[in-house]
Image (spheres, rainbow, N blue to C red):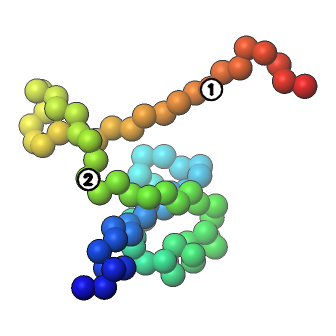
Amino acid sequence: MNYHNQIDNTWIVKPINLTRSVDISITNLFDMIIRLPESRSKIVSKYVSNPVLLEIPEIEGNGVKFDVRYIMRGAKVLH
């Protein structure tokens, strides 16, 4: 087996200004990733294929995906 075939090379491509899964692509084709930004500005990040899932008793299934976002706030003005 080729080394490159063993690597999980899946990427998620999202527009910078849309939400709710609008215009999202998931691919492992590098050529597709390179061509996508020609239509609009995009953000490309590594797709987590084996995520940590939250177990919520009220929701049936294997768990729920989640994301963590940070907001940085500065108390001191930088000059």
Residue density around tag 1, few if under 14, some if 14–19, many if 20 or more, within 10 Å: few
Horizontally, residue 76 falls left or right of residue 25, namely right
Q: Amino acid at mark 1?
A: Met
Q: Residue at x 48, y 46 (%)?
A: 19
Classify mark 1: helix, strand or loop: loop
**Disc sitting over residue 2 in the figure:** none
**Residue 43 % position (x, y):** 56, 57
Residue density around tag 2, few if under 14, some if 14–19, many if 20 or more, within 10 Å: few
Q: Amino acid at mark 2?
A: Asn
Q: Residue at x 36, y 79 (%)?
A: 4
Foreground pick, 55 / 50: 50
Classify mark 2: helix, strand or loop: loop
Looking at the image, is 31 positioned above or below residue 24?
Answer: below
Q: Residue at x 52, y 73 (%)?
A: 33
Q: Can residue 8 be seen?
A: yes
Looking at the image, is 52 positioned above or below residue 33?
Answer: above
Q: Quadrant of residue 60?
A: top left
Q: Earlier in the sequence, mark 1 or mark 2?
A: 2
**Residue 53 % position (x, y):** 23, 39
Number of numbered tags placed on the structure image: 2
In the picture, which quadrant includes the C terminus?
top right
Q: Which residue is identified by label 1? A: 72
**Residue 65 % position (x, y):** 28, 41
Distance CA(mark 1)–CA(mark 2): 28 Å
Q: Residue at x 16, y 29 (%)?
A: 56
**Disc sitting over residue 50 in the figure:** 2
**Residue 24 % position (x, y):** 44, 60
